[in-house]
Image (cartoon, rainbow, N blue to C red):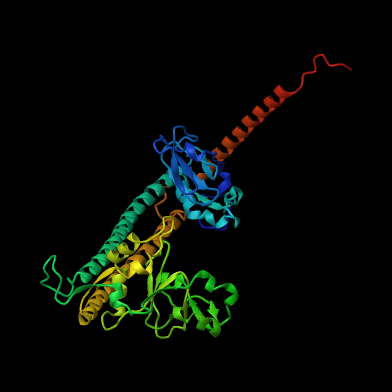
Amino acid sequence: MSESREIPCGWEIVRLGDVCSFEYGKALKAANRKIGGNFPVLGSNGCVGYHDAYLVNGPGVVIGRKGAAGEISFVGKNFWPIDTTYFLKLNKDLSLLYFYFLLKSLRLNQFEKSTAIPGLNRNDAYEQIIPLPPLPEQRRIVAKIEELFSSLDKGIESLKTAQQQLKVYRQAVLKWAFEGKLTNKNIVEGELPGGWEYLKLRNITTEKDGLRRGPFGSAIKKEFFVPSGYKIYEQGNAINDDPYRGNYFIDEKKYLELVNFKAIPGDLIVSCSGVTLGRISEIPNDAKPGIINQALLRIRLKHNLISNKYFILYFRGASFQKKIFDQSQGTAMPNLVGIKDFKEIELLIPPLPEQHAIVAEIESRLSVCDKIEESIEHSLKQSEALRQSILKKAFEGKLVPQDPNDEPASVLLDQIKAEREKQAAEQRNVNSKRKTKNKPSSVGAKC
């Protein structure tokens, strides 16, 4: 097959379906996928268990058919592909690893059907036009890709290690800060820095309305919503540290009924349930007036004792977050402990001037972390772009030099065609014998 596409001498341009096929995997109950079996069981997303028997002689390539449609996995040993997958059937004169990398470069997930369970129709894949180099060059291309990808993977691993180290460092900075070690050079282990003291939440929040949970859910119903008016602050505002998101409003009458739950600039709102329990955000000066809903806790601090910035950083620290979750209620979904108990949680508070110094020190150090993190993210994106560039060059014939002594790919195509014709003839012969065997006998037939 020809196409207006530049390829090296000796290469061919073909349909994917002309040189390989995608065969259906076979169902295997989850109960039969053992942890200690000898052979990997492959689903659309990769290995999903092990089994004592195998369906396909490995090594092999598995293609996601349902769910993670178009995902490509390589298996180095005998394996069992389940019924959400295809497995690649390839002529013995072709390189399996070449086709593995080729299929990854085709991004077959672009053909997944938009249904409840995304699926890949193999006929869509078969129509893809692919480059076919001579077999020796297929092997050279694979060797070069593996060499380059190995170096790339080592670099990515180092970047991800650096990311993890940054996370550890961030928590260490907060820990040191709230132990007084960032602002007290000669601190004695086990002793409080001068002027520091333990205070309970009830000591640092305003007396009447310092800690208030949102109203019962029945107090804010959909029928109360209006196009504009007083904002309803939701759990998502605290979770995403974004007080501006959300478009639910109530009118002034309903607002006045629920005015005890109002949120004003300087208030802190906290998520009260789920895995996001303890997420916190500050209501800024330009925020819309409104109320908190039932999923939030409102905190008002005594600013002569503690600053919002210091409190937020302390609140987000690993130690304080652990306290919140340790005291949470519920099993399937953690919920904030009752206000009565929550008020009794202790915090270690320095004098107000030192709080400001600690916040400045934390922000300075974490700002450096943010810049490094941004650089790492950029490098990781570049790594993925480089991976795609390597594959692109490989399948354009620009990754390794051509060898004029290689047998051209046209010979491969002839061999594949002959093999397919032979298999088709054998199948027709089997079908013919089956029909003859099942044909009713005419012996003893009456006129």
> Which residue corresponds to the image point at 14% horizontal and 76% vertical from the top-left?
194
Q: Is residue 415 left or right of residue 272?
A: right
Q: Is residue 406 visible?
A: no
Q: Position of residue 431 (x, y in %)?
A: 67, 29
Q: Is residue 218 visible?
A: yes
The quadrant of the rendering that contains the C terminus is top right
Q: Position of residue 351 (x, y in %)?
A: 20, 79
Residue toward you, 219 or 85: 219
Q: Position of residue 186 (x, y in %)?
A: 10, 72
Residue that lies at the very extreme toward the right in this rendered image: 447
> Which residue corresponds to the image point at 27% horizontal and 67% vertical from the top-left?
170
Residue toward you, 331 or 51: 331
Q: Position of residue 123 (x, y in %)?
A: 61, 49
Splitting the image into 4 quarters, where does residue 304 fall? bottom left
Residue toward you, 53 or 94: 53
Residue toward you, 27 or 347: 347
Number of callouts in the render? Answer: 0
Residue that lies at the very extreme toward the top in this rendered image: 444
Whether 429 is drawn above or below 154: the answer is above
> Which residue corresponds to the image point at 84% horizontal and 16% vertical from the top-left?
445
